[in-house]
Image: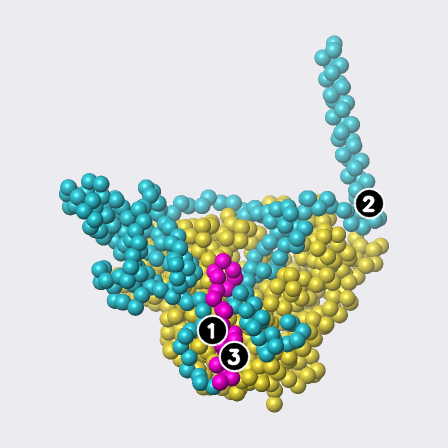
Amino acid sequence: MKEIFLLILEIFKALIEILWEKIKYVLKILWIRFFGYEEIPQEKKEAVVEWGVTGEDEWPGITETETKEPQVKERAVSPPSAIPDLPDSYGESRIVLMQRDPLCLFCYWELQQVKIDNFLKNLSTLAYGARLVLRVYDVTNILFDGNNANKYFDSVLVQGAKDWYIHLEEPNRSFCADIGFLTSDGTFHVLTRSNTITTPGMCPSDITEEQREEIEALYEKVYASMAIDTASHVPESASAKWQRLFSHILSSPETC
Amino acid sequence: MKKGYLSLILHAHLPYVRHPEFDAYLEEDWLFEAVAETYIPLINVFDNLINEHIDFRITMSLTPPLISMLTDELLQQRCLRYIEKRLELAEKEIERTNNQSEFNQIAKMYYNHFHDARYVFAEKYQRNIITAFKKFQDAGKMEIITSCATHSFLPLMNNNVNAMRAQIHVAVNHYEKHFGRKPRGIWLPECAYEPGIDQLLKEEGIRFFIAEAHGLLFASPRPKYGIYAPIVCPSGVAVFGRDLESSKQVWSSKEGYPGDFYYREFYRDIGFDLDYDYVKPYLHGDGNRSNVGIKYYRITGKTNHKEPYSIEMARDKAAEHAGNFMFNREKQTEHLDSLMDRTPIIIAPYDAELFGHWWFEGPLWIDFLFRKIAFDQQTISLITPLEYLDRYPENQCAVPSASSWGYKGYSEYWLNDKNDWIYRHLHIAADRMVVLARTYPHTDKYSIQQRALNQAARELLLAQSSDWAFIMKAGTMVEYAVKRTKEHLFQFNKLYNDIRANAIDEKWLCEIEHKNNIFPDINYCIYQ
């Protein structure tokens, strides 16, 4: 008997809830109809950053208050469909260097297991203790033949690593990279060699053609301290320095 | 005699999104929103200026994917459907806000906006708005330039020159097909340049491109006029540098005009604000709330409190900002003119979709700017880069520095831990495409083998679009960008294997030819 009573009570509660929701809904409709907008609680709002603007990635910005809460929400891709997987490897041994910025390279590679096995077999006794190494050469201003690099550094490859970001000491240099085995006698045996890549400079060129004094003076002032730090936005940084140095010459009074 | 030239450049681009396999597709809305909110309002501005005999010059890059979509029958049909749905919603909004006069007049503004968009799109330009841009070019008011075939980031594919060359060659042919002559300028996607790319442009007869400021400022030897005159690469192609001072006034979300408190707030859209059942017919099939393009509030301030939009006050602001922009350019060129022995040029490039879509009043600002330049001053005049080269054919020879207009000025936005996985696949696909083109140098016209080879080239190009890497980094719609990258690469790899095994699946080939129909005239031999 008690159980039946509890059941009826539950059903009654559920009906009240449904009825209350309906009343709320009708009240809301009436409110919107006669008083305009429904005030949406702000935490529900989604700031959907859509496709459309590239460039400096500045616009549209998220205002200070918006940044307090994560507002960018991924919209569902419509309609969903299965994404075919790409191959893990292409059956080749290769290494490719790419330039991210004047002080950073990206390097990816793929090594064929059969090639590694044969290679180690040929190394015979030297194979024992041989380490797989990424060797990055500075080949600035030379025709690289494998032995004449200006300098190089080695990084022992971690098992399973497939790519690497390489942070550089200075811009405006050329690089080439090998993957190979460094054996116990200190010899480096190349498995595969990359393309050569040249990083850009980060300051005005030392080479000038113009002798006209005012132009020289202009450049001296503009470029005097324009060593760019890639941690900042280069065009912005270059521009800011330009603005500061030339505010009295180049820029309009209103913008300085 | 003018003391300076201003070259306004609008870069119009959207990635190729077309899904005939579905009745509607969320990401196709990118195009429809841009048509209704950016391209048609801009067309109206230029049409009105011409009708009123007000002289102006503007440069626009229309990328091959954008042109392909704007001339595609299916997307044209869907675009009209989109505009008509918005018009229907605007009509309902007039009724709904009948008792709220401040909202009601905004609803009427939207109604007029979509009503006009439908007329311009469907009747005036017969669904093909590319003809409008061609008309402006033929009238001598606009220089239309091209971009890469699928907006690829060229420096990140520099280990395969044939693939880079194909991106440019396909774009040039595509431009010629639509505009009746070859392009004279190019917008390098993301302004991404590295020495040597200019040589590929030269091969295609391109005369100029735009680089980020430090591309010129760090050129060797030092350009004597900085970014205020073009330099010429050793190949003979001219480079113009982006002026950051003028760019910032428009671009910057903090200091730029579009952030003014009287301008329309992008993020208060009735697709999110109004009752779900009311807006549901205008949302997508998945039922998720999304923007529907009707927004009643102004930016107001930095808090979430928003005041209703005022059409008149926003218009006054657009006029004021146009005047301010012009005044600053006047002052800028007056100073430069005193230092240079030639008339300086200020290059002000922007993403076209900023105007109208994000910055609702953007087209109006351009309208005011062009009118003010024509009537209110004598210091500057509008010019295209090509006209400047005609006036100053001799320019300093220098090699620009590698650069882009993206985050930090180089390649990082397109090469980072969110998207670096794509390059090993893209590079091998490009190498394989060259292998295919060299292995099968001659194929019979319309043969299945030739069709498969051409489709392989299309899939490769579509996979190379820089948009996918950009979206992966930006963090919105990532799933779609990953899907597109994987899909095109998967299809390329299957074609590669099928062609080599002489086992092409014709039914499947037909399907992907129908789906990914960009560049119908492509010839895979460009990869040889």
Across and down, in percent, residue B203 comes to 37, 75
Viewer-nearest of discs 3 and 1 = 3
Q: Compute the Cα span from label 3 to label 1.
A: 15 Å
Kind of residue at badge 3 = Leu
Q: Residue at x 56, y 73 (%)?
A: A245
Q: Residues within 10 Å of mark 3 (few under 14, many from 20)?
A: some
Of all chains in the rendering, the one displayed in cyan is A
Up/down of A19 relative to B423, above or below: above
Say which mark, if any, is on residue A31.
2
Which residue is labeled 3 in the image?
A218
Which residue is labeled 1 in the image?
B216
Across and down, in percent, residue B133 comes to 57, 73
Nearest to the observer: residue B495 or residue B243: B243
Viewer-nearest of discs 2 and 1 = 1
The reply to whether dot 2 and dot 1 touch (C-beta < 8 Å) is no
Left or right: residue B24 compared with residue B396: right
In primary-sequence order, the first of circles 2 and 3 is: 2
* Letter of the chain that mark 1 sits on in the rendering: B
Of all chains in the rendering, the one displayed in yellow is B
Q: Residue at x 66, y 86 (%)?
A: B378
Q: Which residues are magenta?
A: A213-234
Left or right: residue B367 compared with residue B228: right
